[in-house]
Image: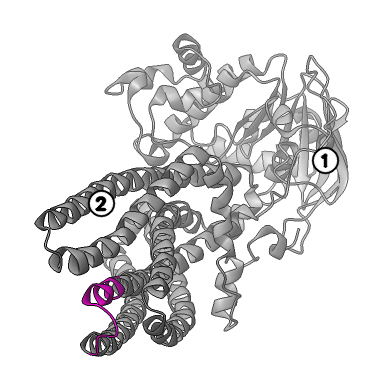
C-alpha cells in the first residue's frame, strides 16, 4: 500500500505537512469540515432546536429598529403619551424573547459542540486502534496525540459556537439587508457599493490566515513530540545529564510554535481591523447622506434611524463573519489533519466474507513458503520459510539477533502479511480468517512488555477483561507474581506508573506472563518471555510456563538456550531462513550454528 493511500509517507510526515515543507502549496478548502456533517445529523433534534433558537434571536434583533422607528415617528411626534409606553413595552417584550432565544441557542449549540467532538475523538481513536504497526512506525505517536486532542478541540469550536455565530450573523446580514431595501432603496444601493470592498479582502486574506493556522498547529505538534519523547525516556535523559540540553531544545521548539502563532494572530488582527474600518467608514458615509436627506425632508428621522440600525446590524454581522471566517479556516486546518488519519487505511483487514476457523481449536500452525520484507526496506526479513507446528507442540526459535524470529510471531498474529507464501492456522489461510477470531486464539508475551498506568489487577485483566479477581490472582500465582504484588502498598489495587516504571524488569515480565495465562488461549507466543528474570525467578516462571504450555501450541523465542532445552523441536533461524531443525540433543551433536551457540553460552555459564 502506498504512502499516499495510507495517509503518511515513508518519512512519517503527513501529506500536507510534507507538501508545505517542500515548498508546494496544498489545496485549501472548507471540505475537511464535512466530516462534522454525519455527527451533527446524528443529533437532529438538538440541531433543529439550535436553529430555531438562532432564528428567533435573530428575528428579535431585527424587530428592534422597526420598533425604534415607530417610537420616533409616531410616539415622539404624536399627542398620545400612552403610545410611547406601548412601544417601550414592545421593546421589553423583544428583549425577553431575545434573552430566552439566546440562552437556548447557547445551550444547544455548545451541547452540540461537546457531543460532536466527543464522537469525533472516539471515532478517530477507534480507527487508530485498527491501524497496524506499519503506520506507527511511520508516524510518531505524539504527532497522532496532538491531532487527537488539540485538533479536536479546535473542531469543537467549529461544531459549536463558530457554526452558530456564522449562521446567526448570516441570518442577521441577510435580514438587515432586506430591511434596508424596504426602508430606503437609495441608501441601500450606496451600502451595496461598499460591500465588495469588504468581502474581497476578507476572502483573499482568509487563505493567509488558514495557512498560518496550519503552520502554528504543526509547529506545536512538533514541540509536543519532542517533549513526549524526552519525558518517556526521563531516566536516560537524567543519566546522561541531558536535562539542560533538552530544556533548551524544547524552549526553542516552543518559541518556534509561539512565533507561528504570533504570525497567525497578526494576520487575524489585521483582517479584523481592516474589515471593521471599512464597515464603519461605509456606515458613516451612508449616515451623512441620510442626514442630508432628512434635512431636505426627503425622509423622516425615524426612517433614517431604522436604516442606520439595520446598517449597523449588517456591518456588525459582516465584521463578526470576518472573525468567524478566521476561526472556520483554523478549524478546517484541524479537520484536514484529522481527515488524513481517518483516510489512512489499515494495511491488514479482515476479509469481507471470512472463512470460519475450526471449533474447537486444534492449534496447528503452518508456514508454507513464506517470504516477507518490511515496508520501506529492501533486504528480506524472511525467505521461503516452511515448517509445521503440530497441535500441542512446543517449538523454539533460536538464532542471532535480527535473524527473523520476532518477525515470524508478527506474521502469525497478522500484524503484517507476507509477500509470498501463506500462513495457516488449523488449515485456514489467516488472510481469509476474521482478524479478531484469529487473534483471540493467541496469547502473546512480548520482549518489550506493555504495561499501563492503571492498577495491577487491570493490567493483568487486560488479557481477559471479564475475568474475576480470583482468576486474576490464580494467573499471578502461576506466573510467580502474586508474592511481590501483595507486597505493594495496595496490593492488586496498586496503580502502576506509566509503562509500569515503578516495577523492576522481572516484575513487569511476570505481570505480562500472568496476563497471557489469564487469556487461556490455545496458542501461546513467547518472545523472550523470561529474558528480564534473575536465575531463581526464571526457574520458577519456567516451571509455571511448562504447566501452562501443556496441551497448548507454543512458539517460544529465546536467546538463552537453557530455557528451550525441553522444547519438542528447535528451529535455528539465520538470515531469515531455517538453517537447522531438531531437538537440543540432536542439534548439539550436529556441530552447526546451534552447537556453536550452545557451546558459547554453556561455557560462559560454567566459568561463572
Q: Secondary structure at mark 1?
A: strand
Q: Is residue 540 or residue 412 the one in the foreground?
A: 412
What residue did someone put label 1 on? 580
Q: Choose the circle earlier in sequence order: 2 or 1.
A: 2
Residue found at the far front of this picture:
79
> Is 298 part of what is drawn in magenta?
yes
- What residue is at 70 percent from the left and 39 percent from the top? 409
Left-right relation of 479 to 453 = right
- Residue that mark 2 sits on: 94
- Find residue 506 and report its horizontal and vertical position in percent: 45, 32
Residue lying at 21% horizontally and 88% vertically, measured from the top left: 295
Position of 144 with respect to 527 (left or right) is left
Name the spot of residue 426 as percent of width and height, x first. 84, 25
**Residue depicted at x 71% and y 20%:** 522
> Which residues lie in the magenta part?
296-309
Residue 219 seen from this side = no
Tell whether position 271 is magenta: no
Residue drawn at point x = 26 percent, y = 77 percent: 304
Image depth: mark 2 or mark 1 in front = 2
111 and 81: which is toward the camera: 81
Amino acid at each position: 500500500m502506498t504512502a499516499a493511500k495510507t495517509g503518511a509517507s515513508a518519512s512519517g510526515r503527513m501529506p500536507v505537512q510534507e507538501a508545505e515543507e517542500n515548498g508546494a502549496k496544498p489545496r485549501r478548502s472548507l471540505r475537511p469540515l464535512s466530516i462534522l456533517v454525519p455527527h451533527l445529523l446524528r443529533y437532529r433534534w438538538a440541531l433543529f432546536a439550535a436553529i430555531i433558537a438562532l432564528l428567533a434571536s435573530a428575528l428579535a434583533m431585527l424587530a428592534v429598529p422597526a420598533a425604534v422607528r415607530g417610537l420616533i415617528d409616531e410616539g415622539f411626534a404624536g399627542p398620545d403619551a400612552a403610545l410611547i409606553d406601548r412601544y417601550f413595552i414592545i421593546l421589553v417584550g423583544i428583549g425577553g424573547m431575545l434573552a430566552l432565544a439566546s440562552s437556548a441557542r447557547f445551550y444547544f449549540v455548545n451541547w452540540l459542540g461537546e457531543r460532536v467532538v466527543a464522537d469525533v475523538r472516539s471515532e478517530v481513536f477507534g480507527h487508530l486502534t485498527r491501524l497496524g504497526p506499519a503506520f506507527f512506525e511511520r508516524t510518531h505517536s505524539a504527532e497522532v496525540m496532538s491531532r487527537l486532542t488539540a485538533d479536536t478541540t479546535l473542531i469543537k469550536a467549529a461544531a459549536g459556537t463558530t457554526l452558530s455565530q456564522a449562521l446567526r450573523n448570516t441570518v442577521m446580514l441577510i435580514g438587515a439587508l432586506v430591511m434596508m431595501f424596504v426602508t430606503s432603496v437609495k441608501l441601500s444601493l450606496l451600502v451595496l457599493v461598499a460591500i465588495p470592498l469588504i468581502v474581497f479582502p476578507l476572502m483573499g486574506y482568509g487563505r493567509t490566515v488558514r495557512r498560518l493556522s496550519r503552520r502554528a498547529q504543526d509547529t506545536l505538534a512538533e514541540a509536543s513530540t519532542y517533549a513526549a519523547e524526552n519525558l518517556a525516556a526521563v531516566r536516560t535523559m537524567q543519566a546522561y545529564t541531558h536535562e539542560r540540553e533538552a530544556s533548551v531544545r524544547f524552549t526553542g521548539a516552543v518559541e518556534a510554535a509561539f512565533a507561528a502563532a504570533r504570525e497567525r494572530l497578526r494576520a487575524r488582527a489585521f483582517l479584523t481591523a481592516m474589515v471593521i474600518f471599512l464597515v464603519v467608514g461605509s456606515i458613516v458615509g451612508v449616515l451623512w447622506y441620510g442626514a442630508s436627506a432628512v434635512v431636505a425632508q426627503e425622509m423622516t428621522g425615524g426612517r433614517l434611524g431604522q436604516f442606520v440600525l439595520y446598517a449597523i446590524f449588517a456591518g456588525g454581522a459582516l465584521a463578526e463573519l470576518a472573525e468567524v471566517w478566521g476561526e472556520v479556516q483554523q478549524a478546517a486546518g484541524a479537520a484536514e489533519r484529522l481527515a488524513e488519519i481517518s483516510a489512512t487505511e489499515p494495511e491488514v483487514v479482515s476479509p469481507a466474507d471470512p472463512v470460519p476457523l475450526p471449533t474447537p481449536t486444534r492449534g496447528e500452525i503452518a508456514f508454507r513458503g513464506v517470504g516477507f520484507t518490511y515496508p520501506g526496506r529492501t533486504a528480506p526479513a524472511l525467505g521461503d520459510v516452511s515448517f509445521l507446528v503440530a497441535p500441542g507442540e512446543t517449538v523454539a526459535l533460536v538464532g542471532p539477533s535480527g535473524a527473523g524470529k520476532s518477525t515470524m510471531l508478527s506474521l502469525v498474529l497478522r500484524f503484517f502479511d507476507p509477500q509470498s507464501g501463506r500462513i495457516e492456522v488449523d488449515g485456514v489461510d489467516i488472510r481469509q480468517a476474521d482478524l479478531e477470531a484469529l487473534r483471540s486464539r493467541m496469547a502473546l508475551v512480548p520482549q518489550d512488555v506493555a504495561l499501563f498506568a492503571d492498577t495491577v489487577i487491570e493490567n493483568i485483566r487486560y488479557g481477559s477483561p471479564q475475568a474475576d479477581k480470583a482468576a486474576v490472582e490464580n494467573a499471578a500465582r502461576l506466573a510467580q507474581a502474586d508474592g511481590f504484588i501483595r507486597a505493594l502498598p495496595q496490593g492488586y489495587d496498586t496503580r502502576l506508573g506509566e509503562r509500569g516504571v515503578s516495577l523492576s524488569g522481572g516484575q513487569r515480565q511476570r505481570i505480562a506472563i500472568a496476563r497471557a495465562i489469564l487469556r487461556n488461549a490455545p496458542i501461546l507466543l513467547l518472545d523472550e518471555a523470561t529474558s528480564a528474570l534473575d536465575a531463581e525467578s526464571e526457574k520458577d516462571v519456567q516451571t509455571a510456563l511448562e504447566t501452562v504450555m501443556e496441551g497448548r501450541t507454543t512458539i517460544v523465542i529465546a536467546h538463552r538456550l537453557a530455557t528451550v532445552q525441553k522444547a519438542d523441536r528447535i528451529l535455528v533461524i539465520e538470515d531469515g531462513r531455517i538453517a537447522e531443525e531438531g531437538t537440543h540433543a540432536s542439534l548439539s551433536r550436529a556441530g552447526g550454528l546451534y552447537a556453536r551457540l550452545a557451546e558459547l553460552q554453556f561455557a560462559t555459564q560454567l566459568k561463572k
